[in-house]
Image (cartoon, rainbow, N blue to C red):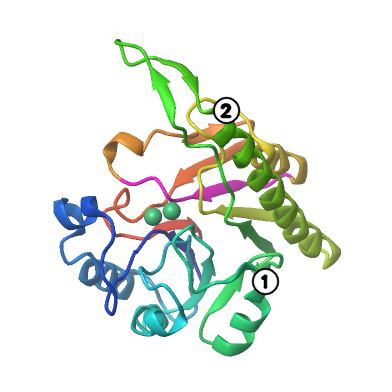
C-alpha cells in the first residue's frame, strides 16, 4: 500500500488549452500519455493517488467529462484537490461531487480522507502572486497593495477551510496528518503563512503543493525540511509526469 501525489494535469480532451506556455513547452507534449504510463507502472489497485488540483481546462462539468474519465481510469484510489482552474468544482458543491462520483473519485475540501493511520487533509490554499515591481537589477522593490489586500481575504477563507479539514480529522481521532494544497504554502516573499502555521500547529508530517509551472517558478516556495515538516512540490511538469511517492 502506498500514497502518491501529482498535480496540474491540465487535461484538455474536450476543451481548448488556454495557456500559451502549455502549447509551446516541450514538457507538455503528449503529457497525458506519460501520466497514464507512469501511473500504470507505479500504482497498484490498493494504492492511493492524490491529484493536487488544476485537473482540466473545461469550464464546467460537461466540458470535463473526458478529463475526469481519464483520471477515473487511472489505477488506485483517486483523491482530488481543488485548483484555481477547476471551474467545474463550485466550492459549495464538494459534497455533491462526492455523491456524484462515489466511489470512483473523492473530492477533498472541508473534509478529510483516511490513509492507514494518517488523515489526508487539504484545501486549495492561496498566496499573493503579485504584480511585484522590480528595479533594474531584478530585485523586488514593491507590489500592488490593492491586489495584496484582496489576496489576504482569499487566504483567510482558505485557512478557515483548512481548519475545518484538520478539525474533522482530529474529531475522528486522527493524530497524524499529511497536508495537501494546490497553491504553494507561501509566496516568494514570505517565509511563513497561515498554512505553514497550521501545518506546525497540528503537527503535519508533510506538506505537498502544486500550481508552480515552468522552471522559473519551481523554487517559489519552501522545498525540503522546515521546522520538522517536509515540503514538496508535486506539479506535473516539475515531476516530469511521474507521481511522487509520499508514503509507503
Ligand atoms: Fe496549474
Ligand atoms: Fe494552479
Residue located beneath label 2 in the image: 145
As drawn, which residue projects farthest toward the right?
171
Left or right side of 9 for 174: right
To which quarter of the image does residue 8 belong?
bottom left
Specify the segment rendered in magenta.
203-213
Q: Position of residue 149 (x, y in %)?
A: 63, 35
Q: Residue at x 41, y 72 (%)?
A: 59
Can residue 94 be found in the magenta stretch? Answer: no
Give the answer, above or below, for where 36 lies relative to 157. Answer: below
Residue located beneath label 1 in the image: 92
Q: Position of residue 132 (x, y in %)?
A: 44, 26
Q: Secondary structure at mark 1?
A: helix
Q: Position of residue 60 (x, y in %)?
A: 45, 77
Q: Which badge, 1 or 2, is on the more N-terminal residue?
A: 1
- CA separation, marks 1 and 2? 29 Å
To which quarter of the image does residue 170 belong?
bottom right
Give the answer, above or below, for where 136 lies relative to 39. Answer: above
Please rate how many residues cluster around mark 2, counting C-alpha atoms within 10 Å: few if below 14, some from 14 to 19, many from 20.
few
Asked if ligand 2 lies within 8 A of label 1, the reply is no
User: Does the rendering let one see residue 174?
Assistant: no
Identify the main secondary structure in magenta.
loop
Instruction: Indicate which label's residue lies in the foreground, 1 or 2.
Output: 2
Q: Residue at x 68, y 44 (%)?
A: 153
Q: Position of residue 123 (x, y in %)?
A: 62, 57
Give me the disc on residue 110: none
Q: Residue at x 72, y 43 (%)?
A: 198
Q: Nearer the viewer, residue 205 or 148?
A: 148
Amino acid at each position: 500500500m502506498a500514497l502518491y501525489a501529482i498535480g496540474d494535469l491540465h487535461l484538455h480532451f474536450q476543451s481548448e488549452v488556454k495557456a500559451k506556455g502549455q502549447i509551446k513547452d516541450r514538457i507538455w507534449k503528449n503529457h497525458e500519455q506519460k501520466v497514464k504510463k507512469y501511473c500504470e507502472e507505479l500504482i497498484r489497485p490498493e494504492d492511493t493517488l492524490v491529484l493536487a488540483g488544476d485537473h482540466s481546462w473545461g469550464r464546467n462539468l460537461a466540458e470535463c467529462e473526458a478529463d475526469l474519465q481519464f483520471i477515473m481510469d487511472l489505477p488506485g484510489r483517486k483523491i482530488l484537490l481543488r485548483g484555481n482552474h477547476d471551474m467545474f468544482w463550485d466550492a459549495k458543491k464538494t459534497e455533491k461531487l462526492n455523491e456524484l462520483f462515489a466511489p470512483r473519485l473523492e473530492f477533498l475540501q472541508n473534509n478529510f480522507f483516511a490513509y492507514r493511520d494518517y488523515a489526508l487533509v487539504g484545501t486549495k490554499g492561496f498566496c499573493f502572486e503579485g504584480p511585484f515591481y522590480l528595479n533594474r537589477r531584478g530585485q523586488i522593490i514593491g507590489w500592488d497593495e490593492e491586489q495584496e489586500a484582496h489576496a489576504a481575504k482569499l487566504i483567510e477563507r482558505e485557512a478557515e477551510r483548512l481548519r475545518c479539514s484538520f478539525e474533522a480529522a482530529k474529531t475522528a481521532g486522527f493524530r497524524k496528518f499529511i497536508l495537501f494544497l494546490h497553491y504553494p504554502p507561501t509566496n516568494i516573499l514570505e517565509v511563513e503563512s497561515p498554512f505553514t502555521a497550521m501545518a506546525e500547529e497540528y503537527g503535519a508530517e508533510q506538506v505537498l503543493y502544486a500550481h508552480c509551472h515552468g522552471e522559473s517558478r519551481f523554487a517559489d516556495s519552501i522545498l525540503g525540511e522546515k521546522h520538522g515538516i517536509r515540503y514538496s512540490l508535486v506539479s506535473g511538469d516539475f515531476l516530469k509526469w511521474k507521481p511522487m511517492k509520499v508514503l509507503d
